[in-house]
Image (spheres, helix red, strand yellow):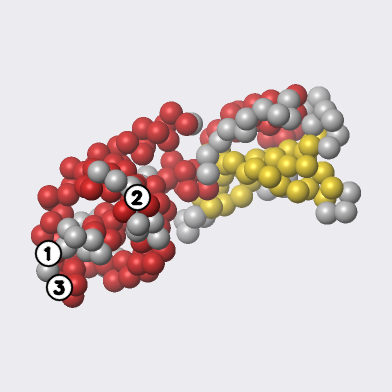
Amino acid sequence: MVCKDQVAEILQSQEFFITFCEDGVNKVRISTTQVGFNYIDVIQLDVGSHDDEYGMCISTTVYFNKDEFDKAFSMMCDIIKNSNIEVCGKTREEVEIASLGLLEVSHYTYLDAVINLFWVKVFGKTTSEMFCGGIVSAHGDKCYDYKRSMPKRGIPFNRSALLFLLTYTKEMDREKHFSEEWVVENYDKYLPFIEQAEKEYLEKLTKKA
């Protein structure tokens, strides 16, 4: 029998707790860790199988916000009772967004969260459907040029990064070296789409939680 108070005490000491499922093969591990560039304290749940040579072979990892210990513990107990149960929780990115909000996470995390929702509102298609599914990895590093300048112009950096990626599409109506001015001039035009995309993402995240 797993003792909830004991697990909570162990987690507070920054150690981890391991238990086996009933068949003695599947394993679940609960631990504390930190995610994101802000080092947010979260609860991590690893689910996998036991290997005599390599120890735990992890197949699924989910995360819970620090104040969701009861939910994480309940999920762990359900897995112990039934190793075939669907493992529910957040991804690293989702738990970071749930803690900080969309505008405070890294722009890569933000873009991965909302870009397809935004793209559908602008083009009626996702990035993949427009053959630009790798646009974030290909051009996301160029957004760093806006990190200081855009907030000074009243535009949150993460939102400016989203608009900057539009300059690689037909929405851009001038030469590429005018990208920054285009982003500033078109911010109000696209803001309703941005806000809708952010709202939809957060609603999905809330339902998932």
**Residue 116 percent coordinates (x, y):** 34, 47
Q: Is residue 52 above or below residue 69?
A: below
Disc nearer the start of the sequence (1/2):
2
For label 3, the residue is 175
Q: Nearer the viewer, mark 2 or mark 3?
A: 2
Q: Nearer the viewer, mark 1 or mark 2?
A: 2
Spatial separation of the CA atoms under disc 1 and disc 3: 7 Å
Q: Is residue 68 above or below residue 91?
A: above
For label 2, the residue is 129
> Which class describes the residues within 10 Å of circle 2: few (<14), some (14-19), or many (20+)?
few
Element type where label 3 sits in the image: loop
**Residue 39 percent coordinates (x, y):** 52, 55
**Residue 5 percent coordinates (x, y):** 71, 29
Residue at screen point 57% across, 52% down: 34
Disc nearer the start of the sequence (2/3):
2
Residue at screen point 18% across, 68% down: 180
Residue 64: quarter of image: top right
Residue 154 makes an appearance in the image: no
The amino acid type found where label 1 is placed reads: Asp
176 to the left or right of 54: left
Q: Nearer the viewer, residue 140 or 129?
A: 129
Residue at screen point 14% across, 73% down: 175
Element type where label 2 sits in the image: helix
Residue 85 makes an appearance in the image: yes
Element type where label 1 sits in the image: loop
Spatial separation of the CA atoms under disc 2 and disc 3: 25 Å
The amino acid type found where label 3 is placed reads: Glu
For label 1, the residue is 173
The amino acid type found where label 2 is placed reads: Glu
Residue at screen point 18% across, 47% down: 191
